[in-house]
Image: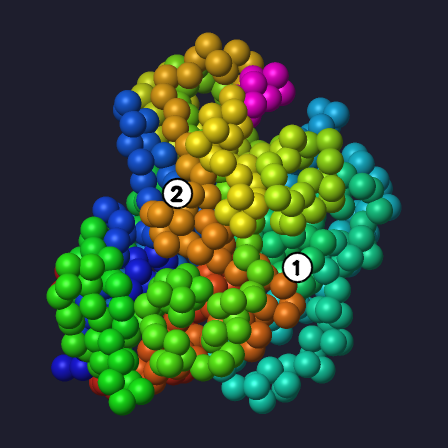
Amino acid sequence: MNRAVVVGGGFGGIASAIRLRAKGYEVHLIDRCPRLGGRAQVFERDGFRFDAGPTVITAPFLFDELFELHGRRREDYVEFRPLDPWYRFQFADGDVFDYGGEIEDTEAEIARFNTADVQGYRRLVAHSEKIFDVGFTELSDRPFHNLITMLAQIPALLKLRCYRTVWQMVCAYLKDPKLRQAFSVQPLLVGGNPFDTTSIYGLIHFLERRWGIHFAMGGTGALVEAYRKLMEELGITITLNTTVDKILVEDHQARGVRLDTGAELETDVVVANVDPKHLYGHMLESSQQTWAARKKTQHHALSMGLFVLFFGTNKEYPDIAHHTIWLGQRYRELLDEIFSATSLPEDFSLYLHRPTATDNSFAPEGCESFYVLAPVPNLNAGIDWDSQGPLLRQRIIESLSEHMLPDLEQHLVTDFYMTPEDFESDYLSVGGAGFSVAPLFTQSAWFRFHNKAEGPENLYLVGAGTHPGAGLPGVVSSAKVLDHLVPEVVSSPVLSTA
């Protein structure tokens, strides 16, 4: 049987392992973390559970497909529960905008701010659907290592004006300044600045409207565990707490991997769910990669960093939504500082996750589990996180106590945080970037790191830094690209008994 090694156990690696098994490969997945999931680790402290990574499920069909490939039903492994609202936006002056539910619910909320923007929102969603039909339906699982493929898409992308930024696209349809902010923040969820990110990411509006936003009961960690169980049933080998140091290349073919223990594994196919800048910068010799790969590694701009504060309280906050996006006094100026400054901004905007709003298993009775995420500069800014980390933690807690969670400081039971330094050390994310390379137009599709390695044969890339990009739908779709690239061993999916 042909062998495949998958390096990295994030969602891109998990999806790749399951798809390669369906193609008939004997699959070995290796990850350096103590659990599967990549950034979607699970922390347990003082009776509280915390999801460390993504908190929402969009495009649930992408996750269902991986079970269906092997004759299973996702519903038999983990429950997806729809959320309403999807997000609550809280502005600096105290105004609140609830986004989600039926389209009539969203339109009623929009009308409270500007009745003329109701029609503008309908046009925005209609335009988003056109982008979705091209950018997602046609292109998200298509390989882009061939320039001809990219050139063939230019007319459609120009027709949809994808050279515009997300901010420019939203402003073409909405006039209210607060609504413009609320409907342009989506690129931040995949590591991009709305004022720089290509408007092809505007497809997220239709994606959310078409399938809604869901929460995996038990958290994203429960979805990871469901896939672990599936992989165990399929006979996929999983090795954790182990780092792959090198890709072994012979006659311009990837022939195996070298582990941090010094052991070497031979294989026929290598799939790297690794930050591409780390892959080309540390796991392959310069002579084993193309000029283009070296240039991308040196010059592709990174996404922002993340400061993530996890905390549990001995008080309940029933009025707080499952997801709240708290927008500070500044918007564009703050984002400019996050993406280009050399110091930590004095203010912040926050993404607050309260899983106990939907699933009380995250905390002891009468308690709440939270995480709050603040976009921050990546490590290129040279911030001293040993000194700035505790200060930022305190500033966030004080702000939450003042604006959202009364008396928070008096009700903290446990708390800890992650900085961009942790993303670099734990996940080998170059520059501590939260989402690998930024989703600029000049770093998308053919311009992004290719799924077919720009170097040895039999080496393939999946994950946030490759096509189609970051976010759960993006990284899971990057594994679908392999269906076009990796040869099949058998003509029908491998089925096994549970």
The colour style of the image is rainbow
Q: Is residue 487 magenta?
A: no
Q: Nearer the viewer, residue 44 or 456?
A: 456
Q: Name the N-terminal-most of marks 1 and 2.
A: 1
In the displayed structure, 79 sits above or below 248; it is above
Pointer 2 residue: 422
Q: Which mark is residue 401?
A: none
| Quadrant where the N terminus is found in the figure | bottom left
Spatial CA distance of label 1 from label 2 is 26 Å
What is the secondary structure assignment of the residue under circle 1? loop
**Side of 120 where 28 appears, left or right:** left
Pointer 1 residue: 197
Q: Few, some or many C-alpha atoms within 10 Å of disc 1 (few <14, some 14-19, many ≥20)?
A: many
| Quadrant where the C terminus is found in the figure | bottom left
Residue 67: in sight, yes or no? Answer: no
Q: Residue at x 56, y 41 (%)?
A: 376
Q: Which residue is drawn at 39% across and 24% down?
A: 415
Q: Nearer the viewer, residue 154 or 219?
A: 154
Image quadrant of residue 495? bottom left
What's drawn in magenta, residue-wise? 395-403
Image quadrant of residue 316? top left
Dominant SS of magenta comes to: helix
Q: Does the magenta stretch include residue 402?
A: yes
Give the percent coordinates (x, y) of residue 293.
Answer: 47, 75
The amino acid beneath tag 1 is Thr
Q: Residue at x 37, y 17 (%)?
A: 413
Residue 263: in sight, yes or no? Answer: yes
